[in-house]
């Protein structure tokens, strides 16, 4: 793609919108899990409701694109599970124990794993500077966890690893969209993918007794409102924008949305009273430097 012209302006606009929307998703998840310091929804209820509501939002478009499912069902299933289903639960469980700002910081690893998956699975060429970026990013992630504020007796928390697993899933999903679903409209990919995991969300809602929680927990309805905002904007509509950004640029360049996301996530966290340690900020700078090196030379066509 050319850097100038309509596509050039559009890719930056999409990048800004996605960064703001997804950067705010971590505080929305926190609000879905806790209200006034009290538990509201469980992680499974939050993730299930998020997927189900996003599916309802995009469901009217399913009939328009349903014919595309049969010839592309394998990559669609892959991006549905790895780009939507699994990460929704990983981040929900993570934020039941770690701060929303820390989750946002760790999410910055997406471009690193996008590149690694591209190299290992999709034969994307790796330069020395990209490898240095990957190593820096991983070092920054380990430092962020080590110096991060987590609940429990130890700073090292298994819950802080869950967002990293989520970014690995995003790495696979981004490459699948770029290399296997490039011929489909961005809206079609989003609609078909969420339609594959939306019913699983409904199953999770019923299995965890969300209706009973809404009837008995005074904070549950407010929490569900935040989840609805997250689902509509952070999952449903943003999936379309994300897939369009990948098509305009590259999977790695599109993953650079994580440059701005941690800034937004940290800002929300500070406003919500979450502690922010200087060493955490330093580690975020290390991660973003790694992301910059990962992108260096890979977005020439973006």
Image: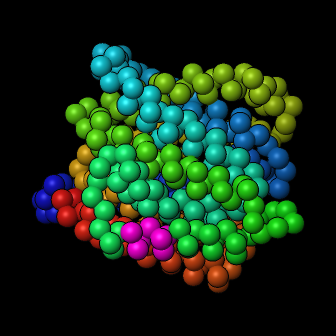
Residue range (magenta): 131-137
Which quarter shows the N terminus?
Answer: bottom left
Residue 103 painted magenta: no
The percent position of residue 84, horizontal first and vertical second, equals 51, 38
The residue at the point 29 percent across, 35 percent down is: 181
The residue at the point 87 percent across, 31 percent down is: 216
The percent position of residue 74, horizontal first and vertical second, equals 39, 26
Where 63 falls versus 82 (above or below)? above
Residue 132 painted magenta: yes
The one of 138 and 217 positioned closer to us in this rendering: 138
Residue 265 quadrant: bottom right
Where 287 falls versus 299 (above or below)? below
The residue at the point 38 percent across, 57 percent down is: 115
The one of 203 and 234 positioned closer to us in this rendering: 203
Look at the image and tell me whether residue 299 can be seen: yes
- Residue 156 is left or right of residue 89, and the answer is right
Look at the image and tell me whether residue 26 can be seen: no
- Residue 4 is left or right of residue 128, and the answer is left
The percent position of residue 210, horizontal first and vertical second, equals 75, 28
Residue 200 quadrant: top right
The one of 188 and 273 positioned closer to us in this rendering: 188
């Amino acid at each position: 793609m050319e850097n100038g012209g309509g596509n050039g302006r559009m890719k930056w606009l999409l990048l800004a919108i996605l960064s703001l929307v997804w950067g705010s998703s971590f505080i929305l998840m926190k609000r879905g899990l806790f209200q006034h310091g009290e538990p509201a929804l469980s992680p499974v209820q939050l993730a299930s409701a998020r997927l189900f509501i996003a599916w309802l939002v995009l469901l009217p478009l399913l009939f328009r694109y349903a014919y595309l499912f049969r010839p592309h069902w394998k990559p669609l299933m892959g991006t549905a599970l790895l780009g939507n289903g699994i990460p929704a639960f990983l981040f929900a469980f993570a934020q039941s124990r770690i701060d929303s700002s820390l989750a946002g910081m760790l999410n910055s690893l997406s471009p690193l794993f996008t590149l690694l998956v591209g190299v290992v699975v999709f034969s994307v060429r790796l330069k020395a500077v990209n490898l240095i970026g990957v190593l820096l990013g991983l070092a920054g992630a380990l430092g962020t966890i080590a110096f991060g504020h987590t609940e429990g007796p130890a700073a090292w928390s298994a819950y802080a690893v869950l967002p990293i697993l989520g970014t690995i899933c995003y790495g696979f999903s981004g490459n699948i969209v770029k290399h296997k679903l490039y011929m489909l409209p961005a809206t079609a990919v989003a609609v078909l993918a969420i339609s594959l995991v939306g019913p699983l969300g409904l199953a999770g809602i019923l299995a965890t007794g969300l209706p009973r929680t809404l009837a008995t927990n005074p904070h549950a309805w407010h929490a569900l409102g935040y989840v609805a905002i997250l689902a509509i904007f952070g999952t449903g509509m943003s999936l379309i924008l994300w897939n369009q950004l990948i098509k305009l640029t590259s999977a790695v360049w599109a993953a650079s949305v994580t440059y701005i996301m941690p800034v937004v996530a940290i800002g929300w966290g500070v406003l919500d009273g979450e502690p922010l340690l200087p060493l955490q900020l330093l580690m975020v700078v290390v991660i973003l430097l790694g992301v910059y090196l990962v992108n260096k030379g890979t977005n020439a066509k973006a």
